[in-house]
């Protein structure tokens, strides 16, 4: 896109406008610029203000030094062309006065994701942790709540939905928070040429959504005058919670959203959650589906998430394109899969939960992310080395949210690390996936075949006994053939730089398989599976099989022409997998890629080692 030569970037209209002009992506607003736009607020609305009376009665305002220390490159520095590789800075809070139209495909209805803007660039206050004397907000499992809680929750959501569009606490504007941060409405401040701010595909995924829930929850509590009110969480990792909670299924309730997959609603044809979702997934008995879901959780939280980068996702710093980064284990699955599973895929843009720009319009979104946030807490209890990052470029990354008093607040990741300090907790429920143990496919196939033979012996000719499993090697594709379109299953023998590593070496570095240069259309649902040493003896390995390493998942974004193509990568931990397969001493590992939905381009494969 051509740069804007001399004029200022056009500020956005008020949040209730139906159309926004195209933004100029190559211009940053200096904090010293004069005020160009003041939003008008309807009478009775909570105005978006930026000043707060501190306990000592003084106004606590951000200074230019605060902004610079937080990673922003403002003023004179913003006028310079910055090479993303030339500096290391944390992602800084966006400039709400420069929020623009969301990126949309050709012909799509214009969508304004922008909240009511601050009156000036610096009009925000710094986040302060709540007082330790505040009561804890204990989030309940949604399938366990009683009628008194449901009545309170529905009242709170009804009041939020009744707020006017120019109130930043309104349900519409809370939904827009997610859209603005993930669909191109904000640029990273101070970066030239411009780079869109994206809170997915990287290590800022968990902290951003934790803050989003924190403020959403406190707004609801304020509206019903209950300082203990807590959002429910969708307990999709437990058999009792593996369906859309009933409280979201009543069409007369404010918790209902009509844009959901009807088959997956309670009472639908397939209401049981499939954490390994894909259109080609075979139907399973409830017991088999529950076990598959437990195996998915064990892979994503335990065996495949032993390093921080694997769990959180890859680093994202100022000037970085989020597109080139990789998602963490849980962001891909089950987070991404459940977005798609709930959304209505018959619609052009897969709304509401099925597309990131519209996901916040469904009250179930916040319940879903409650369990995602709970997983962050649980992950840190699963091993001595499972800790948060200490990199200042992660700790000082910042976001902006409106609080329950309509004040714009700048929040840094460093203040989000401990839910107890945020006065937030989760109801204790059984965790059944910690010790889930997968079985190699050939053993499972033999057991299944033996059972089938015992039940149907009189109908099985001896020459075709079901107890016999033919072991066939998959036809291999040479590494020199990449890049290639993944429109069918392919298997590749990938060299291992090291083998027979000691226990200490394995604890120090996780062996990983890296799928490089994944090029996709981000406006489409994309999913493919990855397996290791999977023999060609029937269906490809699935979550219950030891050979199954994981999946790549893309939840759609609505994107404008030219913005939908991007490249990313997938990194999967395989140390435990290789041990369980008895392949720790092999010189090569056969990696099989199986397309489930869509046809991504794959740039290549390699085996590597990850220390952090």
Image (cartoon, grey):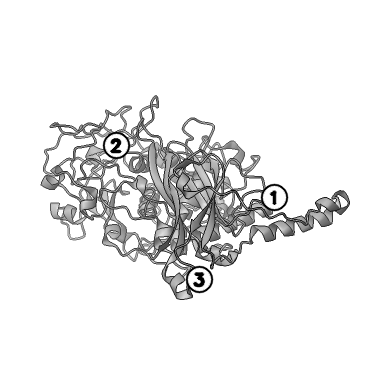
Residue in the picture at 56% in, 65% down: 583
- Reply above or below: 70 against 155: below
The secondary element bearing badge 1 is classed as loop
Q: Position of residue 293 (x, y in %)?
A: 59, 54
State the separation of the CA atoms marked 2 and 3.
69 Å
In which quadrant of the rendered image does the C terminus lie?
bottom left
In which quadrant of the rendered image does the N terminus lie?
top left
Q: Residues within 10 Å of mark 1 (few under 14, many from 20)?
A: few
Marks 3/1 in contact by CB < 8 Å: the verdict is no
The quadrant where residue 251 appears: top right
Q: Is residue 50 left or right of residue 466?
A: left
On the question of residue 338 being in view, the answer is no
| Disc number for residue 44 | 2
- Reply above or below: 414 against 355: below
Q: Residues within 10 Å of mark 3 (few under 14, many from 20)?
A: few
Residue in the picture at 28% in, 55% down: 397
The secondary element bearing badge 3 is classed as loop
Q: Residues within 10 Å of mark 2 (few under 14, many from 20)?
A: few
Q: Position of residue 256 (x, y in %)?
A: 52, 39
State the separation of the CA atoms marked 3 and 1.
39 Å
| Farthest top residue in view | 107
User: What residue is shown with label 3?
Assistant: 500
Q: Nearer the viewer, mark 3 or mark 1?
A: 3
User: What residue is shown with label 1?
Assistant: 285
Nearer to us in this view, 61 or 573 = 573
Q: Position of residue 19 (x, y in %)?
A: 31, 27
Q: Nearer the viewer, mark 2 or mark 1?
A: 1
The secondary element bearing badge 2 is classed as loop
Nearer to us in this view, 334 or 561 = 561
Work out whether mark 3 precedes mark 1 in sequence or the reverse, and give the earlier one. Answer: 1
Q: Is residue 177 left or right of residue 443?
A: left
């Amino acid at each position: 896109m051509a740069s804007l030569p001399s004029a200022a970037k056009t500020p956005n209209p008020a949040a209730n406008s139906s159309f926004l002009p195209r933004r100029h992506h190559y211009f940053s607003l200096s904090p010293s610029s004069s005020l160009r736009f003041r939003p008008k607020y309807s009478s009775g609305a909570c105005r978006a203000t930026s000043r707060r009376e501190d306990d000592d009665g003084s106004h606590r305002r951000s200074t230019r030094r605060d902004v610079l220390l937080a990673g922003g490159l403002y003023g004179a520095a913003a006028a310079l062309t910055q090479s993303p590789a030339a500096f290391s800075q944390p992602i800084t809070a966006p400039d709400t006065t420069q929020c623009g139209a969301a990126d949309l495909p050709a012909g799509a209805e214009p969508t304004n994701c922008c909240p009511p803007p601050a009156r000036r660039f610096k009009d925000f206050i710094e986040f302060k942790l709540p007082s330790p004397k505040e009561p804890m907000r204990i989030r309940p499992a949604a399938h366990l709540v009683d009628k008194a809680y449901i009545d309170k929750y529905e009242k709170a959501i009804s009041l939020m939905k009744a707020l006017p569009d120019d109130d930043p606490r309104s349900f519409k504007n809370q939904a827009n928070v997610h859209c603005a941060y993930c669909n191109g409405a904000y640029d990273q401040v101070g970066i030239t040429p411009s780079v869109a701010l994206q809170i997915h595909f990287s290590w800022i995924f968990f902290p951003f959504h934790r803050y989003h829930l924190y403020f959403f929850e406190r707004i609801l509590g304020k509206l019903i005058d209950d300082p203990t009110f807590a959002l429910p969480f969708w307990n999709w990792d437990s058999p009792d919670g593996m369906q859309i909670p009933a409280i979201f299924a009543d069409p007369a309730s404010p918790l209902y959203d009509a844009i959901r997959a009807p088959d997956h609603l309670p009472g639908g044809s397939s209401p049981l959650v499939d954490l390994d979702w894909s259109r080609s997934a075979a139907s399973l008995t409830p017991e088999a589906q529950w076990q598959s879901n437990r195996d998915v959780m064990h892979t994503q939280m335990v065996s495949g998430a032993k390093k921080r980068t694997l769990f959180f996702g890859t680093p994202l710093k100022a000037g970085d394109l989020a597109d080139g980064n990789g998602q963490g284990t849980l962001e891909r699955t089950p987070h991404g899969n459940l977005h798609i599973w709930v959304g209505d895929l018959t619609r052009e843009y897969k709304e509401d939960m099925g597309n990131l720009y519209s996901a916040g319009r469904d009250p179930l979104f916040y319940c879903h992310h409650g369990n995602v946030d709970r997983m962050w807490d649980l992950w840190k209890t699963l091993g001595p080395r499972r800790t948060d990052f200490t990199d200042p470029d992660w700790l000082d990354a910042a976001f902006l949210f409106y609080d329950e008093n309509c004040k714009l607040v700048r929040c840094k990741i460093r203040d989000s690390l401990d839910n107890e300090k945020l006065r937030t907790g989760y109801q204790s429920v059984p965790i059944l996936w910690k010790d889930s143990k997968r079985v190699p496919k050939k053993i499972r196939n033999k057991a299944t075949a033996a059972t089938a033979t015992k039940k149907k012996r009189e109908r099985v000719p001896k020459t075709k006994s079901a107890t016999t499993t033919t072991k066939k090697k998959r036809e291999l594709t040479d590494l020199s053939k990449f890049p290639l379109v993944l429109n069918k299953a392919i298997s590749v023998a990938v060299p291992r730089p090291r083998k027979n590593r000691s226990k200490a070496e394995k604890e120090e570095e996780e062996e990983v398989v890296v799928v490089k240069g994944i090029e996709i259309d981000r406006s489409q649902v994309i999913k493919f599976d990855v397996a290791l040493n999977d023999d060609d003896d029937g269906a490809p390995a699935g979550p219950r099989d030891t050979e199954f390493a994981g999946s790549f998942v893309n939840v759609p974004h609505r994107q404008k022409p030219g913005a939908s193509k991007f490249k990313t990568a997938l990194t999967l931990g395989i140390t435990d997998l290789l041990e369980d397969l008895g392949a720790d001493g092999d010189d090569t590992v056969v990696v099989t890629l199986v397309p489930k939905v869509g046809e991504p381009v794959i740039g290549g494969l390699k085996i590597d080692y990850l220390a952090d």
